[in-house]
Amino acid sequence: MALQTINIGASANDGSGDPLRTAMDKINDNFAVLDNVINVHSGGDAGSVETLDIANGVLQTWTLDDDTAFTFSASTEQPLTLRLMQDATGGWMPTINGVDVSEYINPLPYSTSVFVLEASGSDITITPKGSLDDCPIFLDFINDDYYIEGVKLARHAVFLTQRASAAAYVNSAVALSNFAAGILRVGDLGALIEPNRTNVVLYNRDLTNAAWTNTHGGQLCIIFASPSL
């Protein structure tokens, strides 16, 4: 069923538009059509079989968390677009009507691959449309996952961090973590990357150091404001 247009008449309250009940019935029918066009799923247990048909949506998005077998009915008259998204683990390989489509699946987590499924009599056509987001470099700082050209690497093999001293990182729980010199600071808020800084006022918390000169020759008074806690 196509979407229906509500007749609003030629002008306000001229009586030529759809009655209120008719208009609201069209709205309900339109919602039913839209609900039958787009459907989002998450699936499946290991070895699960999921049936694809137009009743479940002309555009279906599945988030895979294990190998899944999809079946598509030969009696379907309308093409179906299937979007398969890998979950955070990645690497799940689906089949469609027994056809291994793993060669068209981006193995990286969070990648999305698209297929168009069409039926003509008993013949099923599976057309890969490629990945929406093939990415040669995949960096997930929060989960500490890094891929280069599909190969998973350790963080230190991907990043060369130049920092001469130790530094701190504050996570979402306001907990402080210390990182040694030259180590990228990463936590549940992602990576902390800051520009180079140089302290141009040396010993600014120790005015008794020889780097400071008392030009007035008197007693040196140092007053610090207490931080608000």
Image: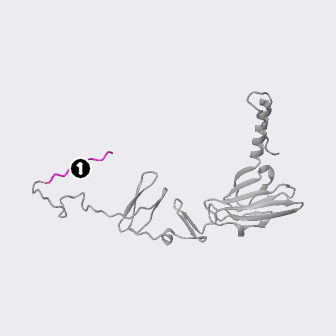
Q: Main secondary structure of the magenta part?
A: loop
Region rendered in magenta: 220-229
Characterize the local packing of mark 1: few (<14), some (14-19) or many (20 or more) Cα atoms within 10 angstroms: few
Quadrant in which the C terminus is drawn: top left
Secondary-structure class at tag 1:
loop
Can residue 228 be found in the magenta stretch?
yes
Of the residues shown, which amino acid type is indicated by label 1? Phe
| Farthest-out residue, right | 121
What residue does disc 1 label?
Answer: 224
**Residue shown at the point (77%, 30%) measured from the top left:** 20
Q: Is residue 183 left or right of residue 204?
A: right
Q: Depth check: 148 or 180 in front?
A: 148
What is the basis of the colouring in this image?
one colour
**Residue shown at the point (30%, 47%) measured from the top left:** 227
Q: Is residue 126 above or below residue 40?
A: below
Q: Is residue 42 above or below residue 200?
A: above
| Farthest-out residue, left | 217
Query: What x and y, as percent, mark residue 72?
Result: 81, 58
Please count the marks in the image: 1
Q: Is residue 73 left or right of residue 108?
A: right
Query: What x and y, as percent, mark residue 91?
Result: 65, 65
Can residue 108 be found in the magenta stretch?
no
Quadrant in which the N terminus is drawn: top right
Quarter residue 69 falls in = bottom right
Query: What x and y, as percent, mark residue 38?
Result: 73, 50
